[in-house]
Image: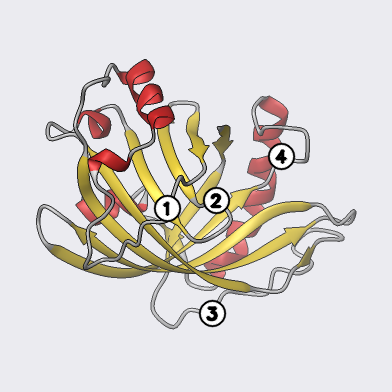
Amino acid sequence: MTGAREIERKYDVPEGAALPSLTGVLPGFTAGEPHTFEMSATYLDTADHALSTARTALRRREGGHDAGWHIKVSTQEGRFETQWPLDSPVSASATSVAPSDAEIPDVVRAELASRFGLADASFAPIAVLRTTRTTVILRDAEGRDRVEIADDTVVALDVAAGITSTWREWEAEFLPLPGTDGNGAAAEAEATSLLNVVEIHLRAAGAVPAAFGSKLGRTLRR
């Protein structure tokens, strides 16, 4: 199990918008080569939306550098994510709903029971997302990864409504230095400084602050 605080900003972008070159946005900063990959994610909740009510998301993701089971909790201090590796691959797409309730690992169920009292709860898919993601890493003068820019094209299924939607968005995520977790006033100040500069360039390229705080929120329109 791993856990970390996320410090990121999300943007809606029009079709055809080109991600700007960010080399030199700060003295000594360089942008790495873009990398494109596919991800699929299935979000689950109880029938009475216990996790959504608690501003929490449970998902199983395949693809990318953080494939696995994730619990994401939104608080006034930010968004915190806990991850566990996949036990076994399960194919998921916007037309094939998976995984089943029985496939949630015991360690994830134990965490849900501890945090939310959901020891005996049953979970079912509420949304299925397929994302084509292109990432660019901004590195400082010492070659350390500091900001990840993601250009996402998303195809999302609202399971209950049977509605599929498609959109494009950009994300800018602060990357804490090795050995730190992104918590504390110093990290918050550094993240704000870096992301403010990046935002100027993204907005000049057509981006606007996202209307929804998460992909799940946009899929379910809440």
Report the Cα–Cα distance between label 3 and label 1. 27 Å
**Rendered location of residue 191, percent (x, y):** 66, 42
Label 3 neighbour load within 10 Å: few <14, some 14-19, many 20+: few
Report the Cα–Cα distance between label 3 and label 4. 27 Å
Look at the numbered disc 1 and give the secondary structure of its residue: strand
The tag earlier along the polypeptide, 3 or 1, is 3
Would you name the residue on which mark 1 appears? 61
Foreground mark, 2 or 4, reads: 2
Foreground mark, 2 or 3, reads: 2
Label 1 close to label 2 by CB (< 8 Å): yes
Left or right: 123, with 106 as reference point: left
Would you name the residue on which mark 4 appears? 190
Report the Cα–Cα distance between label 2 and label 4. 24 Å
Q: Quarter-wise, where is residue 188 in the image?
A: top right
Above or below: residue 91 compared with residue 194: below
Label of residue 66 in the image: 2
Q: Quarter-wise, where is residue 140 in the image?
A: bottom right
Report the Cα–Cα distance between label 2 and label 3. 26 Å
**Rendered location of residue 149, percent (x, y):** 60, 61
Q: Nearer the viewer, residue 162 or 166?
A: 162
The amino acid type of the residue labelled 2 equals Asp
